[in-house]
């Protein structure tokens, strides 16, 4: 079973590796929606996999590094595509958030990335 908690950050970025003339090479911003998914078995006493407040307490310090920032200036996000942002978050949360199963980054209302750590399994 999976639970999730959604967070929102506002951030600017540009994609320097996009093709010449591509609109995403220019500086622009997004209202990112980031879902943190945790997998596990509900505890028999509490009925929870994890308290949503515990997810927030773990995630909030990390997201403070991203919110209202220029993502390209953050080490590891020099080319901050949705894919790279999802993996960057995963790498930092996996060691401290038991049961982390997926990171979902919604960049626009219709576009985003879901990362489940598959590159870390290679």
Image (tube, helix red, strand yellow):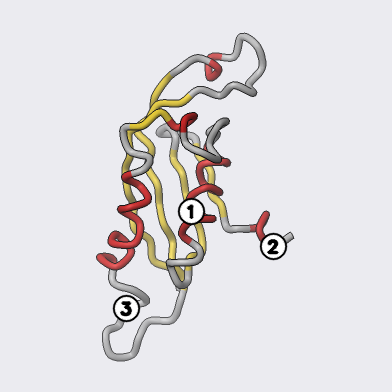
- Mark 2 near mark 3, Cβ–Cβ under 8 Å? no
Q: Which residue is mark 3?
A: 48
Q: Which residue is mark 1?
A: 103
Q: Secondary structure at mark 3?
A: loop
Q: Is residue 16 above or below residue 66?
A: above
Closer to the chain start, of discs 2 and 1, is: 1
Mark-to-mark CA distance, 3 and 1: 20 Å
Asked where in the image residue 54 lies, by quadrant, the reply is bottom left
x then y, percent, for residue 56: 29, 59
x then y, percent, for residue 114: 53, 49
Residue furthest bottom in the image: 45
Q: Which residue is mark 2?
A: 121
Nearer to us of marks 2 and 3 is 2
> Is residue 29 rendered to the left or right of residue 111?
left
Asked where in the image residue 91 lies, by quadrant, the reply is bottom right
Image quarter hosting the C terminus: bottom right
Q: Secondary structure at mark 2?
A: helix
Q: Nearest the camera: 5 or 55? A: 55
Mark-to-mark CA distance, 2 and 1: 15 Å
Closer to the chain start, of discs 2 and 3, is: 3
x then y, percent, for residue 90: 51, 55
Residue drawn where x is 31% and y is 45% of the image: 64
Q: Secondary structure at mark 1?
A: strand
Closer to the chain start, of discs 3 and 1, is: 3
> Is residue 6 rendered to the left or right of residue 78?
left
Q: Is residue 62 above or below residue 11?
A: below
Residue drawn where x is 59% and y is 14% of the image: 22
Q: Residues within 10 Å of mark 3 (few under 14, many from 20)?
A: few
């Amino acid at each position: 079973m999976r639970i999730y908690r959604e967070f929102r950050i506002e951030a600017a970025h540009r994609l320097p590796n996009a093709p010449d003339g591509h609109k995403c090479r220019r500086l622009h911003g997004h209202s990112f929606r980031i879902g943190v998914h945790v997998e596990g078995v509900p505890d028999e006493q509490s009925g929870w996999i994890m308290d949503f407040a515990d997810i927030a307490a773990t995630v909030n310090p990390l997201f403070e590094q991203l919110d209202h920032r220029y993502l390209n200036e953050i080490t590891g996000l020099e080319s901050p595509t949705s894919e790279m942002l999802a993996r960057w978050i995963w790498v930092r949360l996996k060691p401290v958030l038991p049961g982390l199963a997926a990171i979902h980054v919604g960049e626009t209302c219709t576009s985003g990335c879901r990362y489940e750590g598959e590159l870390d399994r290679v």
